[in-house]
Image (spheres, rainbow, N blue to C red):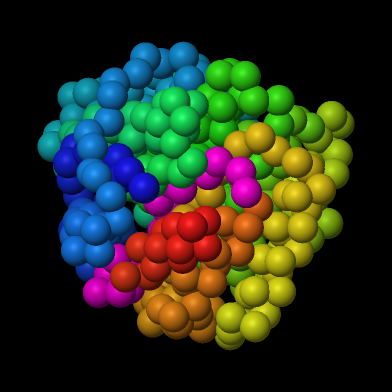
Amino acid sequence: MKTIFSDKHALQSVETEFYRGKWVEAFEIPRRAELVLAEVTRSRLGPVIAPDSFDFKPVLAVHDETFVRFLETVWEAWTAEVGLVPAYPNIWPPRRSRMIPTVRPGAELGRYAVDMSSPILAGTWEAARAGVDCALTGVQLIEAGEAAAFALCRPPGHHAGRDYFGGYCFLNNAAIAAQQFRTRGAERVAVLDIDYHHGNGTQDIFYDRGDVLTVSIHGDPVQEYPYYIGFADETGEGAGAGANLNLPLPWGADFTAYSAALDEGLQRIRAFAPERLVVSLGVDTYQGDPISHFRLQSADYPQIGAKIAALGIPVLFVMEGGYAIEAIGVNAVNVLKGFEAARG
């Protein structure tokens, strides 16, 4: 299996983040991707390649253009007003506000950012675009005949919606890849999100569409970020009715519970009969993860990969979360090795 990786991911490097009322050492750091890459190399998973470059069209196929242009230009506006400091919202619009555009970058950040986890830095846009290029290169490999590929994206993407960012995510790599498969001719595509946190951005993007099935296994939103979305009764609307499956689990869920949810999700994917599958690969389901509350072990992850392989369709794995960084490489690669071993 080929891995696509760009060292531009390191341009998004945050030292601290605001977490539960205090500033702490950041969880989403460049070392995460570097440790996954090291394990890919150590385990001889396959070649590591640099991504090709792509234009804006695949990004604009899932994200609002005004939002995308904002991400591209806000750092310049912010630094002109505030200086060379990380860009955070000054305000979030109160309910029933008049959403008239302002001329202040801090106010506009509140229009698009959903939390304090994802400051804009000088290199944020370039890092996010490089992650998209990794995902789109993976699509290209599969369309050229590869059975699977691994887009080692960072920053992650699945919390980025049509017109908002947060949860360390700026552009939704997995959703952009799924849409690109559709653009390249696949009639049906599925996205399976196995990150601990709900793939709210992916759901938002495809919720009213019946051609892309979204399945997410995650911490129950009554307990867990991103809250307010990811409940089991959210099944899609309009043309997308029945094309969204949420499988929330409570804190403390072990592999027995997780495996049962995964089997249910895979059964739905089989029934949908997609021609391509995108897997949002988060390993913050691990028992040692500092911001998550499931209890999976490193030995469980190959079984996840094997179950996905049993679908027998081309798969693009796209890296998402995982913050127990000393184990992130082993856990992520274990999914991929389990997939490869089962595929034969």
Question: Residue 327 appears at what percent x and percent y?
Answer: 30, 74
Q: Which residues are magenta?
A: 312-329
Q: Is residue 17 visible?
A: no
With 69 as the anchor, is 48 left or right in this view? left
Q: Residue at x 18, y 24 (%)?
A: 80
Residue 85 vertical placement versus 30 (above, below): above
The quadrant in which residue 189 appears is: top right
Tell me where residue 61 appears, x and y as whole percent: 55, 20
Q: Residue at x 42, y 73 (%)?
A: 291
The structure residue drawn at horizontal position 28% and vertical position 24%, both measured from the top left corner, is 52
Q: Position of residue 146 (x, y in %)?
A: 44, 36
Q: Does 170 sit left or right of 273 as displayed?
A: left
In this rendering, would 121 be left or right of 251? left
- Which residue is at the front of the view, 214 or 163? 214
Residue toward you, 155 or 210? 210
Residue pushed farthest front?
344
Residue found 47% across the figure and 30% down from its top: 145
* In the image, residue 320 lies in the stretch drawn in magenta: yes
Judged from this view, the residue extending furthest toward the left is: 84
Q: Is residue 55 magenta?
A: no
x, y (%) of residue 105?
34, 29
Total numbered badges shown on the rendered structure: 0
Residue sitting nearer the eye, 123 or 283:
283
Write down the quadrant of residue 309 in the picture.
bottom right
Is residue 256 visible in this depiction of the protein? yes
